[in-house]
Image (spheres, rainbow, N blue to C red):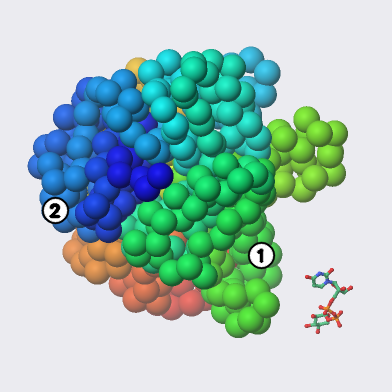
Amino acid sequence: MVVKNVCCIGAGYVGGPTCSVIAWKCPDIQVHVVDVSQVRIKQWNSDKLPIYEPGLDEVVKECLGRNLFFSNDIDQAVREADLIFISVNTPSKTYGIGKGRAADLKHIELCARKIAEVAEGHKIVVEKSTVPVRAAESIAHILSANTKPGVSFQVLSNPEFLAEGTAIENLLNPDRVLIGGEESAEGEAAVGELTWIYHHWVPQHNIITLSTWSSELSKLASNAFLAQRVSSINAISALCEATGADVSQVAHAVGKDSRIGSKFLQASVGFGGSCFQKDLLNLVYIAECLNLHEVATYWQQVTDMNEYQRTRFAKRIIGCLFNTVTDKTLAVFGFAFKKNTGDTRESPARFVCSHLLEEGARLNIYDPKVERQQIESDLTSTRATNDPERIEKLIHIYTDPYQAVIDAHAIVILTEWDEFKTYDYKKMLSVMKKPAFLFDGRKIIDHQAVMNLGYHTETIGKRFTRNTLLRSSGADL
Ligand code: UDX
Ligand code: UDX
Ligand code: ADP
């Protein structure tokens, strides 16, 4: 068999960009992306795509209607496909056993049942969503238990490593593509088919074939390692603040060791995003289920350190503002979990904002990409507060950062958007309450320059001495 027709169930952050790139690079393959959400599909077929990714618009524009199609007709797409990606969301469970930690596989299971119900002939089913080890086995189990005569399946694991904001770049030039399959002739044949698709643009030495379980675990381990690096440097940042060292200097020095490397050593207000926290908790849960308590405790510390970092930053803001933020106005720059995305899932900004709101602060929030309703619903959801009406009165969303700082006591930077580096902070200072404070949770602006303007400045992993501040700002601190 040579794959001619690909279907992807789930038109989200993973399925949408991945299949758009496959369609772009493989004009000889028809790609149908399907979803239960009519709104999502309508958006994919419109001028305003449901997700923001640099380069995505151009790719979709070129392929849409040529060999890339978005629709709600799941049955037909599954029936016609040779190869089916499952790319639905796998959030942490919000109920029952493993609540808050184990991955909720209900969407995956529904997909497997749907495939079993409508499939005809031989299908390769590729698990793309991040799922716990052995999910492929569950999919295979459901499929084989429901197989009709003349229908056969091979299940592969092909985890996604795209990072938001650079998804297209990551998809076009992946460090590696993992393809996990069953160790049998049929399994190898299926691995060969998927390898053939990636071969359209990925060199052979970047395609790794391995067992299904190894592939699934590699995905969890990769995200856990990346998150661990951020927590490690954040732990060092607390030490730096307490002792007068500068975490940027330490990170540079440490990263120069080729055995360690320099990436993912940027101290911050904490990591966010849909994957790190979820995958870490998943790993912890799996370890606990296997009675590997020391392993579970080890990885749990990575997320505990992240929570500590976010809380520490919020407390530092309150401490600097003379131990109270009640009725004070704080201009918050950035709400997305990182720059170049409008995604707020697990964003540290949500946690820091919630902490400040609980203390009675008024927040003027500005983010270049996050929609107003998203910020409002994140901060007033039952997960964030038990008094949404009170919170609603305390938050104001702005589309102009210069308006957001009027009469504010402080600016709080929570996402590393490039535009924050080039603002006219002198102009902003002139309309703020004095002394004006600037808390840089992402270490992105020129601290000496803003101190010279007169801001009391605080950042992660570095403490500016009181003398420097007094000399440079002339402020009455
Ligand atoms: C280490 C540092 O590498 C060196 O830079 C520092 O100056 C002194 O400490 P050393 O203790 O000589 O050097 O050995 P190293 O090669 O780092 O290994 C340390 C231990 O880790 C050894 O027991 C080694 O077997 C073990 N190790 C290392 C592993 O178990 N797995 C690895 O992947 C690497
Ligand atoms: C991550 C993985 O990078 C990707 O391979 C996987 O497929 C999905 O999860 P993503 O969540 O999109 O991607 O973002 P990433 O760039 O990894 O950043 C995650 C979080 O860590 C962000 O909040 C970011 O601001 C933070 N971070 C990252 C730091 O605080 N410091 C760093 O040095 C790097
Ligand atoms: P991810 O980041 O994993 O891509 P998203 O939430 O962005 O997650 O996207 C997942 C998509 O999968 C959503 O658009 C959702 O509507 C879709 N989806 C979930 N369950 C099913 C299902 N059973 N059949 C089809 N689509 C589904």
Residue at 48% from the left image edge and 68% from the top image edge: 204
Q: Height in image: 414 above or below 122?
A: below
Looking at the image, which residue sits at the far front? Answer: 150
Residue at 37% from the left image edge and 37% from the top image edge: 82
Judging depth in this view, the residue of 270 and 438 nearest the camera is: 270
In front: mark 1 or mark 2?
2
What residue sits right under mark 2 in the picture? 62
The kind of residue on which mark 1 rests is Ile
Q: Is the residue marked by circle 2 packed among few (<14), some (14-19), or many (20+) residues within 10 Å?
A: some
Q: Is the residue marked by circle 1 packed among few (<14), some (14-19), or many (20+) residues within 10 Å?
A: some
Q: Height in image: 2 above or below 232?
A: above
Q: Look at the image and tell me whether residue 317 can be seen.
A: no
Judging depth in this view, the residue of 476 and 208 nearest the camera is: 208
Q: Height in image: 34 above or below 280?
A: above
Residue 304 in the image, given as x and y percentages of width and height: 67, 44
What residue sits right under mark 1 in the picture? 236
Residue at 11% from the left image edge and 37% from the top image edge: 46
In the structure shown, which secondary structural element does the residue marked by tag 1 occupy? helix
**Disc 1 within 8 angstroms of ligand 2 (CB):** no
Q: Look at the image and tell me whether residue 50 can be seen.
A: yes
Residue 466 in the image, given as x and y percentages of width and height: 53, 70
Instruction: Say left or right for 334 vs 297.
Output: left
